[in-house]
Image (tube, helix red, strand yellow):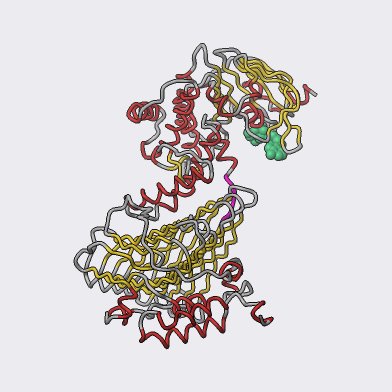
Amino acid sequence: MLNINDLHVRVDDKDIINGLTLNIGAGEVHAIMGPNGSGKSTLSYTLAGRPGYEVTAGSVTYQDADLLDLMPEERVAKGMFLALQYPVEIPGVTTMMFLRTALNAQRGARGEEELNAADFLRLVRTKAKELDISEDMLKRPLNVGFSGGEKKRAEVLQMSLFEPKMAILDETDSGLDIDALKVVAQGVNRLRAADRSFLIITHYQRLLDHIVPDFVHILAGGRIIKSGGKELALELEAKGYDAFVKDAA
Amino acid sequence: MSPKELNRAPEQSWLDAFDAAANDLPGEWLADTRRDAINVFREKGLPQRRLEDWKYTDLRRVLGSDLPLAVIAKGEGADPLAAIKGPRIHLTNGFFESADAMPKGVEVVSLSQALVGQVDWVRKALGSAPRPEGHPMLALNTALMRDGAAIRIVKGTALAEPIVIVHEGQAGRQLVRNLIVMEEGAEATIIEAHSGSTDAQQVQQTSEILVGDNAKLTHIRLQDAGASSVHLATDLVGIGRDALYDGFIVTTGGELARQESHIEFQGEGAEARISGTYLLSSKQHADVTTRINHAVPRCTSREVFKGVITDEARGVFQGKIVVAKDAQKTDGHQLNKTLLLSPKAEIDTKPELEIYADDVKCSHGATTGQINEDHLFYLRARGIDEATARGLLIHSFISEVMAEVKDDAIRAALEAHVTAWLASHAGIREVAA
Ligand SMILES: Nc1ncnc2c1ncn2[C@@H]1O[C@H](COP(=O)(O)OP(=O)(O)OP(=O)(O)O)[C@@H](O)[C@H]1O
Ligand SMILES: [Mg+2]
């Protein structure tokens, strides 16, 4: 599904990702854990195509295409989705209008028919209910005045509407209360499928109790220093990052 | 030719125009007023950029050129806000051309006829709106005013439909004076739509607006004058006790435009709203200057102007709120935000509070910026292409201020104008809601 090979990324003249290799197969769930500032969000922005994230070496192949050649919106149309660590607030654009514009843009780019207003409304209502998101929130400007947890849930709502093939969740669990964490995890698990992959960035082993990963990677200093199965997260919880960073050095 | 003539001051053509026209200007009883006014203009001259109020807008450069006074002409049927229903008043080249039948409780007359004839309410109201002292352009307008629309909404009358003044400019110097008299408890919406040919013209319009006690006036202006126009609109507004003046101005026209609103509270408990948007492209220059004078206690003012500027255009916003010593419990709020779409686009913004009372609530703010790159990326990361995403963000920026227009039909008509402007000047496709 996604093959990242010896990736180097520079932001504002600063090298942040330094030779990162990661292969994600169809249907797999990978978790990335790593200390603050290790480059997790930088990796996710690079994969989403954010301007200013300069790839200085390496390659990324996504579904047999050169991902780095594609515009952000083209990546999305091909099924890539990034739930942001810090979703932005956009006053003046209502959540509902945004969701419909986005969904129909993606469908249009794939040559699929656009959803009419009634079908769209039905779809959003169903998905919103699954995630405990109120109608009132959907009427408000995009993310404006949403609490931290509401913003994260809104990101998951988008994911469940767009049904991506490769979903990257950047600390979607941060800021969620215990109940919301379960709701969000259920949202992810509901989407798990043989042709859909996940890359889950998190600081907390707790999330991985709910979304059980196939692989866990430790990212430090812009590269993956250790990979393993789900038990690696437990080991990390017990020992802390330092032990692994020292081992790798 | 004497050296003096060779080196004529830019004021001279105006003084000459006055001398030539003085005997034909309507209203003999006004002759002294006109003469006093032209003397004020002679003394002050066209505004200098050295003057604080005129720092950013240079009239001497554009108004010095010789251009004959406009002549009476027939309109070509312009009506940029045709979608809005309501009786029309047509002013062509600054002259009152025609008016539809008006509902009961409304009187409409051509100013020139009223000045020549005996229309008592016009005589009484003319010159009575609060005004800044020694304002050279106001003086020039008083000296040379030739025609315009005088509208009276009789005490207690509430209008169901707006009255629309359609201003069509064709050529020349157009010196217009309008009068809007809202008697006690009257309620009306008056819309002005300015458009015109691309021929050179200089429009100088002054409107005296008297909002009586308990009256409510919604005053909308669309200024879409021709591309070679200098367009100066000065509104002098006096607001009575518990009354409301609700103004909204859309500026897209003219080579150089200045909208001045001088608003003064004359009775307690009143409210003024003055908002709008300026959308500027190519080398346009547009100036919005407002003065809200809280002269009495317990009044509320709210002001929101948002603009989008592209190419090499330049915007100016000067907003001043003055709160007099006795004007306790004043509530004044002012905001100016501008989106610059090109590196050469420019805005000079100067919000000012001058407060002499101690028990007041006043705020002001101004921001200027480009499209937010984080917002743009977020929309693209959801599959929305860049052009559409920009359009969405610009629309959302403007829609916030359009919400100040309370009437749905009027807002829709103005939004259609804004959308068309964005499509043709900023390459923004219409965004499906
Ligand atoms: N625009 C930028 N200019 C310079 N440095 C940057 C920029 N963006 C990120 N960095 C730096 O890159 C490093 C990695 O940042 P990144 O946001 O990827 O970390 P992270 O692993 O997601 O951290 P966290 O766990 O706190 O979210 C940090 O040291 C950060 O300060
Ligand atoms: Mg991060």
Out of B260 and A245, give the one closest to the viewer.
Answer: B260
Residue B160 shows in the view = yes
Provide residue A2's location: percent of width, then percent of height.
Answer: 62, 17
Quadrant position of residue B292:
bottom left
| B2 is higher (above) or lower (below) than B339 | below
Provide residue A115's location: percent of width, then percent of height.
Answer: 38, 26
Q: Quick check: is B171 in the magenta stretch?
A: no
| B286 is higher (above) or lower (below) than B328 | above
The answer to whether residue A75 is left or right of residue B267 is: right
Provide residue B76's location: percent of width, then percent of height.
Answer: 37, 56
Out of B75 and B317, give the one closest to the viewer.
Answer: B75
Quadrant into which the N terminus of chain B falls: bottom right
The residue range painted magenta reads B367-371
Residue B363 shows in the view = no
Please identify the residue farthest to the front as the structure is shown: B1
Quadrant position of residue A5:
top right
Out of B169 and B297, give the one closest to the viewer.
Answer: B169
The answer to whether residue A92 is left or right of residue A55 is: left
Determine the residue positioned at 43% across, 74% down. Answer: B294
Out of A144 and B74, give the one closest to the viewer.
Answer: B74
Quadrant into which the C terminus of chain B falls: top left
Q: Quadrant of ligand 1?
A: top right
Quadrant position of residue A10:
top right
Determine the residue positioned at 58% across, 24% down. Answer: A200
| A155 is higher (above) or lower (below) than B226 | above
Provide residue B393's location: percent of width, then percent of height.
Answer: 51, 43
